[in-house]
Image (spheres, rainbow, N blue to C red):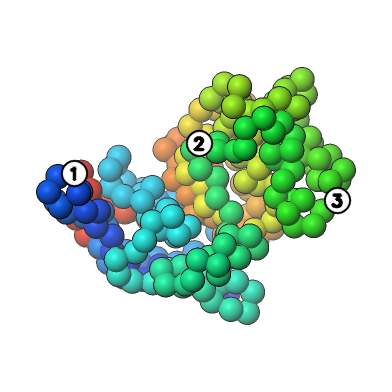
Amino acid sequence: MSEPILEVSGVAKTFILHLREGAKLPVVEGAGFDLHAGECVALGGPSGAGKSSLLKMVYGNYRVDAGAIRVRDGEETVDVATTAPRRLIKLRDTTMGYVSQFLRVIPRVGALDVVAEPLVHDGVPVAQARARAGALLARLNLPERLWQLPPATFSGGEQQRVNIARGLIAHRPLLLMDEPTASLDAANRGVVVELIEEKKRAGVGILGIFHDTEVREAVCDRVIDVTSFGRAAA
């Protein structure tokens, strides 16, 4: 088997509650697993087990108290837990994508340009990037009349489709997904399943949280029980 795209080893995280006299809230301890190209792995466990926290640690949004999170970036391996901020930004630009539950974009920018932006950042000509963005939005059943409007005005399900399109449009070898189908109807959940399968066939390694049982069973090769990583947060 090829070298993993992601290796998590001995990761621990505890939150300090400064408004509660410094009380400590353990999240995970001794977390360890790996992820290979073309594989989709789900983080499983009940609400509060630390799934989202672990995903954010892999992306570098949360600091790690102990352990290593190694991401393969071409011929180099980068430890997200210790790397410099500039190197982390570069890693996100080239290697690591993220589809969060919530869409955070610049106000007043239309949905088409929101989705096209990662391609433009990669050097794809604007017209070509917008064409590919339109094709993806159409596939996700977002009406064309909405494409020029800022997604802040959209419904939750519409915003989530824009979020998914933006996260999937550019190729990144490692993709993190946090409940990507939470606000979608059955038809659009089916489209997302197809898109995830296409990413897997393209060799993308996917780590995600999938509370929808049908989606999880359709796309995930295995499930990692986060509750096995020490005493999780309540």
Placement of 204 over or under 67, stated as above or below: above
Three-letter code, disc 3: Pro
Q: Residue at x 45, y 35 (%)?
A: 212
Q: Quadrant of the C terminus?
A: top left
Q: Position of residue 170 (x, y in %)?
A: 70, 52
Residue 27 falls in which quadrant of the image? bottom left
Residue 221 in the figure: left or right of residue 37: left
Three-letter code, disc 2: Phe
Asked which secondary structure carries label 3, the reply is loop
Residue 76 falls in which quadrant of the image? bottom right
Mark 3 → mark 2, Cα distance in angstroms: 27 Å
Can residue 97 be seen by looking at this rendering? yes
Proximity of marks 3 and 2: CB atoms separated by less than 8 Å: no
Q: Which residue is mark 1?
A: 19
Can residue 229 be seen by looking at this rendering? no
Q: Quadrant of the N terminus?
A: bottom right
Q: Residue at x 67, y 30 (%)?
A: 108
Q: Which residue is mark 3?
A: 125
Placement of 73 over or under 19, stated as above or below: below
Proximity of marks 1 and 2: CB atoms separated by less than 8 Å: no
Q: Position of residue 210 (x, y in %)?
A: 45, 42
Q: Which residue is mark 2?
A: 102
Q: Position of residue 81 (x, y in %)?
A: 41, 68
Residue placed most toward the observer, 64 or 203: 64
